[in-house]
Image (spheres, rainbow, N blue to C red):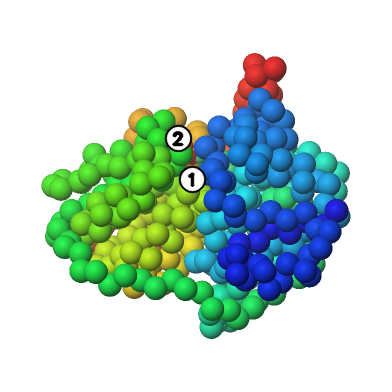
Amino acid sequence: MKLLIHDYSRDEWEKVASDYEGWKVIADDGSIKPCTGCFGCWLKTPGQCVIKDGYDQMGKLIHEAEEILVISKYTYGGFSGFVKNVFDRSIGYLLPFFRFYKGEMHHKPRYREHKKMTFVFRGVGLTEDDKIKARKYVKAVATNLHAKIIDVRFEECQIDVVAEQTKKIVTVGKTILLNCSPHGENANSKKFLDVIAGELEGDVTNINLSSYVNKLDELADTVMSAEKLVLGMPLYVDGIPSLVVRMMEHLEKQGISNKKVYVVANMGFYESKQLENLMSMVRDWCDVCGIDYCGGTAVGAGGMMGAVIKYGSNGPGKNVYESLVTLSEKISKSEPISDVYTNANKFPRFLYFLECNSRMRKGMKKAI
Ligand SMILES: Cc1cc2nc3c(=O)[nH]c(=O)nc-3n(C[C@H](O)[C@H](O)[C@H](O)COP(=O)(O)O)c2cc1C
């Protein structure tokens, strides 16, 4: 079976559908739900997603496919909201356990295979720089999925994002701390944003994106009113979670303007360097929207750092805590900062690796 994952519109698909007769096609029928980050695909129903919306068998489909073709709009250096949603819902293809590969942490494969993948990015006037970013991104995705990239191609196309140029009133000094994790109040992202909240004075509003999944218009109205936006989010499949990509696409369409954007991103593996693609995607979104990217903090070993951040400068969370305090100072002064990549303080990577694998084993036993 050949597998195609695409985000063509209905009209576009009608023109090319005959090229894919006999293929298994994953397209946007409007019913896909975002990943909730529950890890049910590892713990409860291994290999399958627990959200039964017709997109719950992605792990199995990838396994059964002899080759995979991914066609996506070039979106901030990565996939569109829909295609990213499909990838976020595919992590059951892997095992939860960590392993070291080419000097970095990755997941162990569930299946002994290297899927052949081809990527096609569609966009208007894509530059060499755009192409470099997209190639770098899919290389990271393929490394995580143990896949083999056959080709990365770029196609010129007409994409109809027309920003609405309605004038929005911005309250000077107003800061929104937007927790973009589906884990809501329990998220590591929220714990890091809380450190920042504790350092800021004045007009600060905390919002959970998870409360606005079907209310992006309402969220946009609130976000538009702030001068500064601090995005807290996890790394999902080497990039921005689909829910957040969709929010960004929406805000771009709504003509977001006059904003300073900061980011605090965290991830499961130890090395915060793996957040480079995500940080670059947030910057790209800002460039596309004409708003100011002001830098941020990338946090490795996010689960552990989230648990220890309450101890401030004492213990393994020291580096993360101190960089969040520095970031807060910059936010207060509305100044930019270079991205900072932080890792655990004096906590060896190997110990973290053993601890995570042991926790996953216990989680799996408990779930049976
Ligand atoms: C669908 C999905 C994909 C993920 N992909 C990655 C990844 O590519 N690299 C990584 O280090 N962690 C990955 N993670 C782990 C999360 O980044 C990590 O658990 C993070 O600490 C969650 O933060 P939060 O509580 O703020 O949501 C993924 C988690 C999920 C649910």
Ligand 1 within 8 Å of disc 2? The answer is yes
x, y (%) of residue 60?
Answer: 77, 41
Q: Residue at image x 36%, y 39%? A: 211
Please tell me which of labels 1 and 2 falls first in the chain.
2
Q: Is residue 326 visible?
A: no
Residue 360 lies, with reference to residue 350, above or below; the image says: above
**Viewer-side residue, 247 vs 285:** 247
Quarter-wise, where is residue 72 in the image? bottom right
Circle on res. 341? none
> Would you say the beta carbon of the disc 1 residue lies within 8 angstroms of ligand 1?
yes
Q: At label 2, which amino acid type do we have? A: His
* CB within 8 Å, label 1 to label 2: yes
Disc 2 marks which residue?
183
Residue 363, image x, y percentages: 63, 22
Q: Residues within 10 Å of mark 2 (few under 14, many from 20)?
A: some
User: Can I make out residue 253 in this image?
Assistant: yes
Of helix, strand and loop, which one carries label 2? loop
The residue labelled by disc 1 is: 234
Please state the total of marks drawn on the protein image.
2
Callout 1: SS: strand
In terms of image quadrants, where is residue 361? top right
Q: Is residue 36 left or right of residue 217?
A: right
Q: Amino acid at mark 1?
A: Pro
Q: Is residue 254 above or below residue 243?
A: below
Density class for disc 1 (Cα within 10 Å; few <14, some 14-19, many ≥20) is: many
Q: Quadrant of ligand 1?
A: top right
Image spot of residue 97 (x, y percent): 70, 35
Residue 296: percent from the left, percent from the top?
38, 56
Q: Residue at x 39, y 73 (%)?
A: 162
Distance, label 1 to label 2, CA atoms, is 10 Å
The one nearer the camera, 306 or 67, is 67
